[in-house]
Image (tube, rainbow, N blue to C red):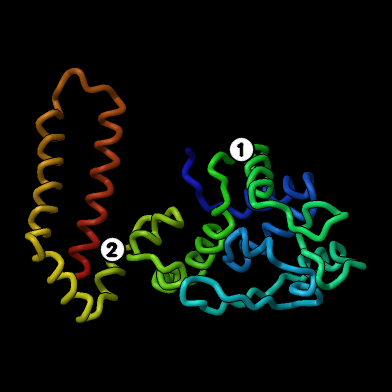
Amino acid sequence: MNWVAPIKDEETLEAFGEALKDIDQKYYILFELGIGTGLQLQDILAFKVKDVKDKKEIHVKIGKHKQKITFKVPTKLQKEIKEFIKDRPANEYLILGHRTKNKPVSREQAYRVLRSAGHHVGLHSIGAQTMRKTYAYRYYRETGDIYHLQALFNHASPSITYRFIGEKPNVELFMRKLTPKENERSRYLLYLNNSGKKRLQKVIKEISTIEKNFDNPKNNDAFYGKVDCLLEELEQLLDSYHEAE
């Protein structure tokens, strides 16, 4: 199964939107609302015409704690929505599955269309979470506030949120923003069942194994490529660790 990733560059995002338009305008509208609000796919499918009609802003609540999000609808999208819902009743589902029935398109069908559009533009890591991850990535790019996103999606740690948006953790930011209470909790957890030393020993053991096997003539180029990437990551993490002291 492919890892679902956000769409990070605007050119690809535009090409993906055009691919959705070629399939059906409703899927383009669905996607634009998804990356604008951060809502889950099933929540977007629950929208009715009245939820978007003549709206310059769309207010939603997302996440476990129902945090309020305001999506300022771009002028171009306002015009496209206006044309899309023209002469449609207010209580009709926005993204209809069949024109003759007031039922939204199924989640499975929407997923298939997103995947198909992705393949058309060379993206193979598209899924139901693509919209939400793209929203989160764009928010992070604009604000750098990983903690807001962590709270929004109820993630256990910022590291999970970084993985969610496909970005490397900013270790220095972590350490500078930790509160005394969080530091105290970290100390407690690291001493609990000797967890800290066990984790350190696991890392040391893994690095030692790589070092011992470094000159093995059976190693191929892929091995050294992985080692090089690992060392680059470790060096960056250590630099951030020392800078935050």
| Horizontal side, residue 5 vs residue 115: left or right | left
Q: Residue at x 8, y 65 (%)?
A: 191
In this rendering, the count of numbered labels is 2
- Please give the label number shown on residue 122: 1
Q: Position of residue 87 (x, y in %)?
A: 92, 68
Q: Which class describes the residues within 10 Å of circle 1: few (<14), some (14-19), or many (20+)?
A: few
Q: Quadrant of the C terminus?
A: bottom left
The answer to whether one can see residue 8 in this image is no
Secondary element at tag 1: loop
Q: Nearer the viewer, residue 209 or 238?
A: 209
Residue at the (10%, 39%) spot, across then down = 208
Q: Dividing the picture into quarters, in which one does residue 75 lie? A: bottom right
Please provide percent x and percent y for residue 214: 15, 29
Residue named by callout 2:
171
Labels 2 and 1 touching (C-beta < 8 A): no
- Kindly identify the amino acid type of the residue bearing the numbered disc 2: Val
- Point out residue 67 in the picture as x, y percentages from the top left corner: 51, 78
Nearer the N terminus, badge 2 or badge 1?
Answer: 1
Amino acid under disc 1 = Gly
Q: Residue at x 26, y 74 (%)?
A: 176
